[in-house]
């Protein structure tokens, strides 16, 4: 999902840098330092427990049960079972104020862990008809642990808290299994914001291409829209010794994949915004000397521009149909296979307003602007409902070059656990500054 990137200092989001809130640093809040110290051990323990017991999308039964149990222990009344295993609770402050939502995702990936840790995952399951390991290779274990720690801290200061905070523990961010619904879209469909419409929403993601201690955020488009597609090339089975007796879907699929590479390289104007077409799986045949009946291809399309997305979807459909016909095969396409994740978009006014808060948490020199990310996030659905800011927390340990560190989704992905502390402090800083009216009198973006 991630790729190596070059980081640059975060540019000012307003022109008058010396006096702009975008260039300021919020005053430190002593209650945050106290909370971070108090929560350190338990957040670490939660993260390690979730890491050792990962669960795939729409299967987060154990994780959601632990989350709900702890929220009840805090005196909250969590709503459970939303979008299968989602957990939602509202902390109502003792003073009037705005409504804010905070989101963490809970699901893991079908990846066999290769990191040697005392709490390494040894979980196996069946995914897409195959036996596989399960690993928190994207850091959602950290996100869940951080938000639980934030819940502790906010409940402890509830009497002095202006406004209210919705805690969203989301299942299935990585995408529901084929044939199922899930994730942020399903939470909204089931009425997540029916009774509590937030004025703003924040989310974070630990990020391998940032050094531990750094925070990355950019205004406007930040992460790509994503579409999943599937293509089935149908031929006619024959003996491998007599290919003329059938229609070879393997050769056809290979030609189709090759031709599809020209969609971005030769047909799409990527001079302003990038785009990607990737084939992620090929399944066909079972024996070395039998040409099979069909080959199944799946992949992803990443875009930032709706018109470019529409064009790529049409181009891929066209390539699949004509290459298959030229080889005497037929094709069945699902392009896209399911509703896409929209572009993850950070509200410019809200992002400018909260930059001083991020600097207060990480230090002004540690807040950077990453380039556009081709990875996608279904946090984007929430960002369509309220002004949103989604930021990255560096997860690569000091002494390791983030440009060469194993990326999110790698079986070698390794979280530097100091990112838990920074994630907690940053979330608390933006939460409290927003609820208390922002920084330096900046008007609410909500």
Image: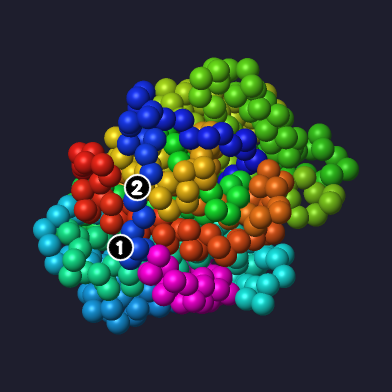
Q: Residue furthest left?
A: 96
Q: Residue visible at 38% across and 44% down? A: 25
What residue sits right under mark 1 in the picture?
167
**Nearer to me, 389 or 130:** 389
Q: Helix or strand or loop: what does disc 2 sit on?
A: loop
**Nearer to me, 279 or 25:** 25
Q: Residue visible at 72% across and 35% down? A: 254
Whole-percent x, y for residue 131 in the image: 65, 67
Residue 211 in view, yes or no:
yes
- Say whether residue 107 is magenta: no
What residue sits right under mark 2 in the picture?
26
Whole-percent x, y for residue 10 in the image: 48, 35
**Nearer to me, 367 or 116:** 367
Coloration mode: rainbow
Q: Report the mark closest to the observer, 2 or 1.
A: 2
Q: Quadrant of residue 99?
A: bottom left
Position of 223 with respect to 158 (left or right) is right
Label 1, residues with CA under 10 Å away: few <14, some 14-19, many ≥20: many
In three-dimensional space, the C-alpha distance between marks 2 and 1, rounded to whole angstroms, equals 24 Å
Q: Which residues are magenta?
A: 33-61
Q: Residue visible at 37% across and 39% down? A: 24
Q: Is residue 383 above or below residue 100?
A: above
Residue 339 in view, yes or no:
no
Label 2, residues with CA under 10 Å away: few <14, some 14-19, many ≥20: many
Say how many tags the image has: 2
């Amino acid at each position: 999902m991630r790729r190596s990137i070059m980081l640059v200092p975060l540019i000012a989001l307003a022109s008058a840098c010396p006096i702009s809130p975008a260039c300021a640093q919020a005053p430190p809040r002593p209650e945050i330092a106290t909370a971070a110290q108090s929560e350190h051990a338990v957040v670490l323990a939660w993260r390690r427990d979730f890491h050792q017991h990962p669960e795939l999308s729409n299967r987060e039964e154990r994780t959601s049960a632990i989350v709900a149990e702890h929220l009840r222990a805090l005196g909250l009344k969590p709503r459970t079972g939303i979008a299968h295993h989602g957990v939602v609770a509202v902390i109502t402050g003792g003073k009037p104020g705005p409504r804010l939502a905070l989101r963490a995702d809970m699901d893991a990936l079908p990846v066999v862990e290769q990191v040697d840790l005392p709490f390494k995952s040894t979980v196996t399951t069946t995914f897409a008809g195959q036996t596989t390991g399960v690993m928190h290779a994207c850091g959602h274990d950290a996100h869940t642990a951080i938000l639980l720690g934030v819940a502790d801290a906010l409940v402890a200061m509830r009497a002095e808290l202006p406004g209210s905070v919705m805690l969203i523990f989301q299942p299935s961010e990585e995408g529901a299994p084929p044939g199922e619904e899930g994730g942020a879209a399903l939470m909204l469909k089931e009425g997540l914001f029916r009774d509590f419409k937030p004025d703003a929403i924040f989310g974070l993601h630990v990020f391998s291409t940032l050094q531990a201690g750094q925070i990355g955020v950019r205004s406007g488009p930040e992460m790509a829209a994503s579409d999943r597609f599937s293509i089935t090339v149908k031929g006619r089975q024959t003996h491998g010794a007599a290919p003329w007796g059938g229609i070879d879907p393997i050769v056809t699929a290979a030609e189709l994949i090759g031709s599809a590479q020209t969609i971005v390289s030769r047909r799409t104007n990527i001079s302003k915004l990038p785009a990607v077409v990737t084939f992620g799986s090929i399944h066909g045949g079972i024996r070395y000397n039998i040409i099979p009946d069909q080959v199944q291809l799946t992949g992803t399309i990443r875009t930032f521009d709706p018109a470019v997305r529409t064009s790529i979807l049409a181009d891929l459909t066209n390539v699949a149909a004509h290459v298959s016909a030229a080889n005497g095969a037929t094709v069945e396409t699902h392009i896209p296979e399911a509703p896409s994740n929209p572009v993850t978009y950070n509200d410019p006014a809200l992002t400018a307003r909260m930059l001083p808060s991020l600097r207060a948490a990480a230090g002004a020199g540690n807040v950077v602007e990453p380039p556009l990310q081709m990875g996608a996030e279904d946090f984007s659905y929430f960002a369509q409902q309220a002004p949103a800011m989604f930021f990255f927390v560096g997860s690569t340990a000091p002494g390791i070059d983030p440009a060469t560190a194993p990326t999110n989704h790698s079986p070698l992905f390794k979280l530097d656990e100091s990112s838990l502390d920074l994630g907690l402090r940053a979330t608390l800083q933006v939460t409290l500054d927003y609820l208390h009216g922002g920084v330096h009198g900046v008007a609410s973006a909500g």
